[in-house]
Image: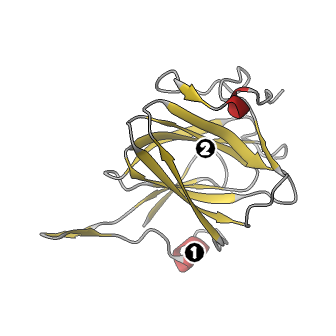
Amino acid sequence: MIFTETKIPGAWLLESQRHEDERGYFTRTFCRQEFLDHGLDFSPVQSNISYNRERLTLRGLHFHAAPFEETKLVRCTSGRVFDVAVDLRPQSPAYGQWFGIELSRENGRGFFIPAGCAHGFLTLQEHTEVSYQMSPEFEPGHDMGIRWDDPSINIQWPATPRVISEKDQALPFLV
């Protein structure tokens, strides 16, 4: 895997190295030692899938409160998404900043999001599936979020969402 650090400290874009032949391809999506070599002590304990029927479905921006902050490795296994992390760590030089990247089955990218960041995505195709590896395990009652359209963050989404849950529409602004 090729690791490229983003403007958010601890958030990394991962490019898979595909081995292709007439059958298709094979690629590694996680290797603990490669993560450790980049200073990332990530031991996923839970895997989740988010399936989204409609194009322009927005999920997020979600995070978990201390002491249950989540670290995530996100991949799009079907369709395409614009995936976003927002740095919510007050001590971070990137506090309040966002980074977004397109993930798809075709580009094979992964997005590693450190604890202390909010996460969300906008689907760019119908029938989109997003896979997460996470640590620690989900702890009910500690899930929180901020508004996807918070003007203090000013995320440049590639399109206006059409499908947003009532819960996500009611999330507070960061400031």
Closest to the observer: 119 or 78?
A: 78
Q: Secondary structure at mark 2?
A: loop
Q: Residue furthest left?
A: 22
The amino acid beneath tag 1 is Asp
The local crowd at label 2, few if under 14, some if 14 to 19, many if 20 or more residues have their Cα within 10 Å, is some
Q: Image quarter for residue 41? A: bottom right
User: Which residue does the image show at 56% across and 77% down from the upper left?
Assistant: 32
Tell me the distance, in whole angstroms, between the alpha carbons under discs 2 and 1. Answer: 19 Å
Q: Residues within 10 Å of mark 1 (few under 14, many from 20)?
A: few
Q: Position of residue 144 (x, y in %)?
A: 79, 43
Residue 39 in sight in this render: no
Scheme by which the image is coloured = secondary structure
Give the side of residue 115 with respect to residue 84, left or right. Answer: right
Q: Which x, y percent locates residue 17?
A: 34, 66
Q: Mark 1 sits on what residue?
A: 37
Q: Earlier in the sequence, mark 2 or mark 1?
A: 2
Residue 82 point in image, percent of width and height: 48, 38
Quarter holding residue 25: bottom left
Tell me, yes or no, whether the two marked residues, 2 and 1, touch with CB atoms within 8 Å.
Answer: no
Residue 154 location, x and y as percent? Answer: 65, 23
Q: Residue at x 69, y 66 (%)?
A: 135
In the picture of the structure, the residue carrying the numbered disc 2 is 7
Tell me the quarter of the image containing the N terminus. Answer: bottom left
